[in-house]
Amino acid sequence: MKPFDLEITSISKGPEELTYQLPINATVQKQISAKNRSDYFIAELENSVFWVDKKKGINTEINHVVICTKKKSQFVEKDMKGVIIAIAYVLDETVNTDKILDLKKIKYIADGTASATKKWGLF
């Protein structure tokens, strides 16, 4: 798979602080399988997002996310438009070198809408 850029433009279910950080731009780097499905994708964020959970005492920056589609009729691909995705924060950066996605290394955080983008609108 060739890397491509995407933009998360809305959050329909998720933490309030994430909506204040929209749009979120990322580069989809690779597809990775887990035990429950084969169509997860690791994306590196252009700018870190902040994760705050006052109840659990979490206040940290996130640099990578794992995404997958919510609908079986939609796909994460270089020409996707308005695709509903599940977004998980990568908690353990070793996930970037793993062959199989360990779901314990990520944390589902939100549902959102994403579209592929082209850098500078030239390519």
Image (cartoon, rainbow, N blue to C red):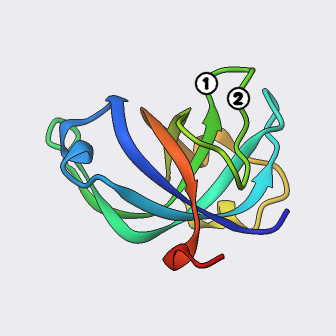
Query: Image check: 50 left or right of 69?
Result: left
**Label 2 near label 1: C-beta < 8 Å?**
yes
Which quadrant is the C terminus positioned in?
bottom right
Q: Secondary structure at mark 1?
A: loop
Q: Residue furthest left?
A: 54
On the question of residue 91 being in view, the answer is: no
Q: Nearer the viewer, residue 21 or 83?
A: 83
Q: Which residue is mark 1?
A: 70
* Image quarter in which the N terminus is found: bottom right
- Residue sitting at 74 percent across and 47 percent down? 101
Which label number is shown at residue 122? Answer: none
Q: Residue furthest top?
A: 72
Instruction: Tell me residue 99's x, y (percent).
Output: 85, 57
Seen from the viewer's position, the closer of residues 5 and 39 is 5
Along the line of sight, which residue is nearer the eye, 29 or 59? Answer: 29
Say which element carries label 2: loop
Left or right of residue 7: residue 122: right
Mark 1 or 2: the one toward you: 2
| Figure check: 47 above or below 31 | below
Residue 34 position in % (x across, y down) = 79, 38
Three-letter code for the amino acid on which mark 2 is drawn: Gln
Q: Is residue 13 left or right of residue 57?
A: right
Separation of marks 1 and 2 at Cα, in angstroms: 8 Å
**Between 49 and 76, the one nearer to me in the picture:** 76
